[in-house]
Image (cartoon, rainbow, N blue to C red):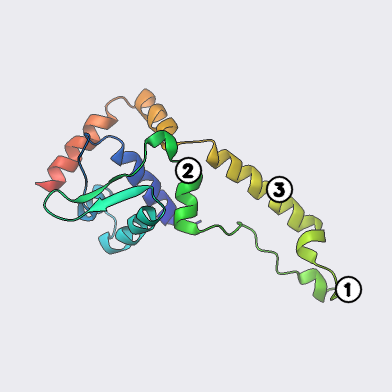
Amino acid sequence: MSRSVEWAAHSCLNLTWLEPGRAVRTATLAAFYGLPAAYLNKQLQALVRAGILSSASGPRGGFQLARAPEEITLLDIVIAIEGLDEAFRCDEILRRGPGGRADVDYRETCVLAQAMRKADLAWRRELASQSIADIKATVEHRFPNTPQMTRNRFAALRA
């Protein structure tokens, strides 16, 4: 998984602490963690295409959540950034090994591929069970000053 997922997830989380109607520009989000703005913008645009974020141009423009945090799962973010492909790709090397046969779909019959698919499904279920609202609640419980500190940092970076 690329680091872009981390950047996208943290950006979504930070956007939960904005006042209603506020948006944050790419440059501000990038400066928040010292990330390259052009590369972060590509990830933010992927989130817009997935319906996770919305964007607007103009003096009050920028990014904000397009859906309620309860409606955005970690899996939504991963898929928006990484796509739908499974984590493990079976290249059917058994076909080239001893006893390999051209008429067998080893992606379906290979025990290793089956185990990897099962693990991938469990991972996806776990990600789908965690919303940005869940993460937000945990952060706020463990670090109660985070929402205000985030808003203050956004304000300082805009200045």
Q: Which residue is mark 2?
A: 74
Cα gap from disc 1 to disc 3, whole angstroms: 26 Å
Q: Secondary structure at mark 1?
A: loop
Q: Residue at x 35, y 27 (%)?
A: 140
Q: Which residue is mark 3?
A: 118
- Amino acid on which disc 3 is placed: Lys
Residue 19 in picture, x, y percent from top left: 21, 34
Near-viewer residue (113 or 19): 19
**Does the residue at mark 1 contact the one at mark 2 (Cβ under 8 Å)?**
no
Kindly report which numbered mark, 1 or 2, lies closer to the viewer in this rendering: 2
Which class describes the residues within 10 Å of circle 2: few (<14), some (14-19), or many (20+)? many
Q: Which residue of the protein is positioned furthest toward the left in this rendering?
A: 159
Name the residue beneath numbered marker 1: 98
Q: Is residue 117 visible?
A: yes
Q: Residue furthest right?
A: 99
Mark 1 or mark 3: which is in front? 3
Q: Residues within 10 Å of mark 3 (few under 14, many from 20)?
A: few
Picture coordinates of residue 83, whole percent (x, y):
51, 59
Separation of marks 1 and 2 at Cα, in angstroms: 41 Å
Disc 1 packing (10 Å; few <14; some 14–19; many ≥20):
few
Residue 2 visible in rendering? no
